[in-house]
Image (cartoon, rainbow, N blue to C red):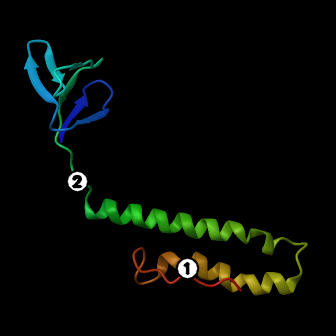
Amino acid sequence: MQHFIDSASGQIYAFDEDVEVVQGKDGYEFKMASGDKLEVQCTLVPHEPVAPSQAEIDAAAGAAVRAKRDEALAETDWTQLPDVPAATRDKYGPYRQDLRDVPAQVGFPYDVEWPRLP
């Protein structure tokens, strides 16, 4: 895979190995194996992609788990409304607290123990 970046927009383009890249006087030309020229309407320069760091991977995993947790909280928001019987609020309260505590779990974000709905 060959990577190029548009120097103006920052958009990254990836071309399969069957695309021939030829550097000309006005920039790069891209030709398909069939000989057809790819029309590129921007200035592309070679780009070497950078793999995400472990911290970035961990942050993305944490964000995904928090999103799932937030969804579970939202699904039970109704249980805490003032017109809901106290027994229902009390039943769901610990579950909702356990959801809020998910990011504090020792294995977070890769080994999460999800609380069960009451």
Residue 83 image-quadrant placement: bottom right
Dot 1: few (<14), some (14–19), or many (≥20) neighbours within 10 Å?
A: few
Q: How many marks?
A: 2
Which residue is found at the position 30% from the left and 17% from the top? 41
Q: Are marks 2 and 1 in contact (CB under 8 Å)?
A: no
Residue drawn where x is 88% and y is 76% of the image:
84
Q: Is residue 57 above or below residue 18?
A: below
Q: Amino acid at mark 1?
A: Asp
Q: Position of residue 77 (x, y in %)?
A: 74, 69
21 relative to 5 in the view: left or right? left
Occupied quadrant, residue 100: bottom right
Judging depth in this view, the residue of 20 and 43 nearest the camera is 20
Q: Find residue 12 and report its image quarter.
A: top left
Query: Could you say where residue 98 lies in the image, as x and y percent from the top left?
Result: 60, 82
Tag nearer the camera, 2 or 1? 2
Secondary structure state at the residue bearing disc 1 = loop
Residue receiving disc 2: 51
Number of residues whose C-alpha sits closer than 10 Å to that of mark 2, classed few (under 14), some (14–19) or many (20 or more): few
Q: Is residue 107 left or right of residue 54?
A: right
Q: Is residue 13 above or below residue 80?
A: above
Quarter holding the C terminus? bottom right
The amino acid sitting under disc 2 is: Ala
Query: Considering the numbered disc 2 on the image, is that residue within a helix, a strand or a loop?
Result: loop
